[in-house]
Image (cartoon, rainbow, N blue to C red):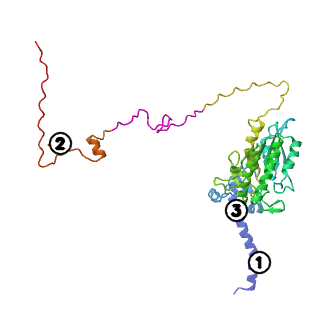
Amino acid sequence: MVSAARIAILVRRTPILFLAIVLLAVGAAAAFHAPAMAQEQPQQNRGWSLRDLLFPRRSERVEPPLDIEKAKPKPKPKKPRAPRPPAEPETPVVEKAPDARTVLVVGDFMASGLAEGLDTAFADNPGVRIVVRSNGSSGFVRDDFYNWPEQIKSLIETEKPAAVVVMLGSNDRQQMKVGDVREQPRSENWTKEYERRTDALGKAIATAKVPFLWVGMPAFRVPKMTSDMLAFNDIYHQAAESHGGEFVDVWDGFVDENGAFVTTGPDMNGQPVRLRADDGINVSKAGKRKLAFYTEKPLMKILGLAAPGSMAPATAPAGAPVEAPAPAAAPIVIDRTAPMLLSDPALDGGTELLGAAPPAKANPALPGERLVIEGKASEASPGRADDFSWPPKAEPPATAAAADTTTAITP
């Protein structure tokens, strides 16, 4: 049995034993670090405290082995970002000349988009100014709201345009009041009145003696709207050509190869872009530019331009050198020779090749011809291989010798 006094002595000695163990560990650490410290700082002589031994400085810590460093997971490389599409180059805006010719664009909200595209197309041309006078909610049906055949006269008198561009009809899929009756869209009476009103607009522009273009409607997302626009375009085409205008068909630029509506399609450079808005009716910025692309060529023909931006100002600055006109290119002669037919090489209606001669007429009395035509063989001569008569026929008597008609020579 351990006495109480013995237990008391052990309790008093326990802190001393713990302290001895700590000092032993500190000494071992000091022995481990002493050679390295002596190499790194051979000339420095400083005392080591308990804190320095237990918590060495960062530069004095032992780095982990290289194999442990290699085993650490490396951060994943970041994926390269997809390159952004190049920004569309901005078209430089050129100040218009004082005598620039005006192109008047009239119609509904589609005409506003067309005018924006034309303004971009002719932005660098000082001789052409695009003026838009549209009414977004207008059409031919509600002439009580906005009467285009009447309004176009005052617009032409005010703007004095060199050409008029019409794009109208997107709001016309509704009832029309004809007399005291409201007719349903595209009914017989509705169509007759609609043709009369479109014809009145074309006649009003022609009376003002201004050349004009009538731009057709594109397809829409709703199939019923698309079929109505096709019918409207036929009416617009007739109204334009009846009064000396030109109809601009933009339909193929906003449908696919099957004639169906598309939201995204090729732009004027053939690159795929978004052409229509989410509602399937309005057009995007690229779609507006594409509408103008279809309109540019006939419009430049009216204005006498070879290409957008090619028209020079009416008067050149004083002292500017006058460039000699470039020599005209030699005309290209295209051979329009009609293709030769093998059955008619001379193109004279003949049916024989060169050198052909009519075949000689066969004599039907000849044995060979009788065999071919009538299927009758000639009678076999006696003694011939095909003579099968029995008893055999006697051979005919020999022909008498011909008389000697030789005249003797008189000596």
Q: Secondary structure at mark 2?
A: loop
Distance, label 2 to label 3, CA atoms, is 145 Å
Asked whether residue 13 is in view, the answer is: yes
Q: Quadrant of residue 221?
A: bottom right
Foreground residue, 330 or 89? 330
Label 3 belongs to which residue? 29
Dot label at residue 12: 1
- The mark closer to the camera, 1 or 3, is 3
Foreground residue, 56 or 383? 383
Residue 359 located left or right of residue 96: left
- The mark closer to the camera, 2 or 1, is 2
Query: How crowded is the residue under tag 3: few (<14 C-alpha within 10 Å), some, or many (20+)?
Result: few
The residue drawn where x is 82% and y is 36% is: 127
- The magenta stretch spans residue 347: yes
Q: Which amino acid, by three-letter code, is at mark 3?
A: Ala
Asked whether residue 82 is in view, the answer is: no
Label 2–label 1 contact, CB within 8 A? no
In magenta, the rendered stretch is: 334-361
Residue 111 located left or right of residue 265: right
Distance, label 2 to label 1, CA atoms, is 165 Å
Q: Which amino acid, by three-letter code, is at mark 2?
A: Ser
Q: Which amino acid, by three-letter code, is at mark 1?
A: Arg
Foreground residue, 78 or 175? 175
Q: Secondary structure at mark 1?
A: helix
Label 2 belongs to which residue? 381
Distance, label 1 to label 3, CA atoms, is 28 Å
Image x and y of residue 369, in percent: 29, 42
- The magenta stretch spans residue 117: no
Query: How crowded is the residue under tag 2: few (<14 C-alpha within 10 Å), some, or many (20+)?
Result: few
297 lies above or below 45:
above
